Amino acid sequence: PDLIADLRLSDLAAEPLWPSALVAGAAHYADSAPRDMRSPIDHALLGSYAPASAGLVNHAVEAAHGAFLKWRTVPAPLRGELVRRIGEQIRQRKQALASLITLEAGKISSEAEGEVQECIDICDFAVGLSRQLHGLTIASERPSHRMMEQWQPLGAVGVITAFNFPMAVWAWNAMLALVCGNAVVWKPSEKTPLCAIALQRLVESTIDEMTESVPAHLCQLVLGEREAGERLAAHPLLPLLSATGSTRMGRTVAQAVAARLGRSLLELGGNNALIVAPTADLEMALRAIVFSAAGTAGQRCTSLRRLIVHESLVDTLCQRLAQAFESLPIGHPGAEGTLVGPLVDAEAYWAMQQALQAAEQQGGQRLAGGNRLEQGVPDHGYYVRPALVKVPGNLPIVMEETFAPILYLMPYSELQDAIDLNNAVSQGLSSAIFTDSVREAETFLGPAGSDCGIANVNIGTSGAEIGGAFGGDKDTGGGRESGSDAWRNYMRRTTNTVNYGTALPLAQGVKFEV
Ligand code: UN1
């Protein structure tokens, strides 16, 4: 409890932007009966917020759309200047923002700081991008004609984010959307409204400093639950809806967006596997496995859930991992040395218990963890020891994504079997192989290898850098966010053909003389 008080007082209350946000912010962004906001650390009441009504959601979208109509003609590098300043603000407040993530999402300090760093990184990336929104010049088949493509701003973009990355996923989407000339309407997880309010305040204050070039209302925040998300999905003034969360949520949202022929950008469930081949560097593999499986208490979409181990290494890995899991420091996420913080809430805990029970019923053997800790952890939080369960293969429960630290370990004998196991689940987000064999590594990365959007060699499944495109296929939804050319999702492409001659030749040699 003292640590929480410290977190709040030293980092948050001292921060000029927060106090009003924490107190009045919730009222400002919402307008119906208040809901309690609680910390996963100890269930302490952090405040309350009220979900936005249909009217408020509509108001936010219309205001954003109005701002977009002005913003789209502001030169892209100048749009980059806004993002540069937002990045600067985030940099200056890195500690305070990280503390807020720890308080509201229960992440350990180092990971919370890492998440804020991810926001800073994507700002830098987006600033550079603001001078590189390139289109092609294309050879025309007609004389004295020039063809080119331009990338144009799209509109107001809806962004739905999950509790486990309460800041970074917004940043991936919003910072790219802004340099691309769009407005943003953000609906954060109902579990992490404070992180969203803090960032919103920071963005609004930055916009207020640039009123000459930046229209007001460019970035909107709507707090709410499922209904708010569904309203965004159905809103005709949002040409793009980016949604991160469960596959079930994504399916609902995508269908609503598709019904109005909008675009969706989905980053949904993962059921990520790592193959440990006979030549793997075991010490490195162990570190990667423990971070990917137990880090963020198993609550990343990239968390390692399935370990596919060559049969010659099964006994060694079972023993080493059980040992590692049993000795992980679990506790207050703000305390020094803690590596595993709490699960986000009771629901997450019970889902984990149910999955463990199902795994045992289906033939799995629990080798370590899974239990709730009562000693040495803050009261009322759901602290669990990450579980290691040996399974014969992809049991029915293994095919599901349980958003908690459960690692299923299964054997293989031939690489092809391991790849088949990797690909057998419906999700397709992240995957990895530990091997010293070039053949194995390249086979895994090749066209008949891993079917995931992310495939790694000799690193874990989680903790991607922002420079690459992030996302996966199948039930993961097919979206690619963050780096590489993901910016194209936030723009519309126009193809322009210009005739600078004095004749009017038609394409494909068509004759049509009048
Ligand atoms: C998520 O869990 O939704 O690759 C995103 C990672 C992080 C992002 C995870 N950079 O683990």
Image (tube, grey):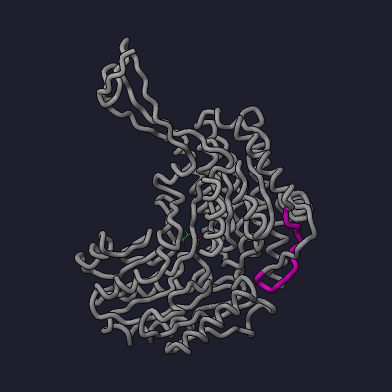
**Can see residue 163?**
yes
In the shown orientation, is residue 450 left or right of residue 257?
left
Residue at left 75%, top 67%?
45
Q: Position of residue 48 (x, y in %)?
A: 76, 61
Q: Is residue 117 above or below residue 443?
A: above
Q: Quadrant of residue 150?
A: top left
Residue at left 27%, top 75%?
417
In the shown orientation, is residue 139 left or right of residue 30?
left
Q: Position of residue 442 (x, y in %)?
A: 23, 62
Q: Position of residue 235 (x, y in %)?
A: 62, 46
> Is 50 contained in the magenta span?
yes
Q: The C terminus lies in which quarter of the figure?
A: top left
> Is 181 contained in the magenta span?
no
Residue at left 56%, top 85%?
371
**Can see residue 19?**
no
Q: Quadrant of residue 89?
A: top right
In the shown orientation, is residue 391 left or right of residue 280?
right
Range drawn in magenta = 40-52
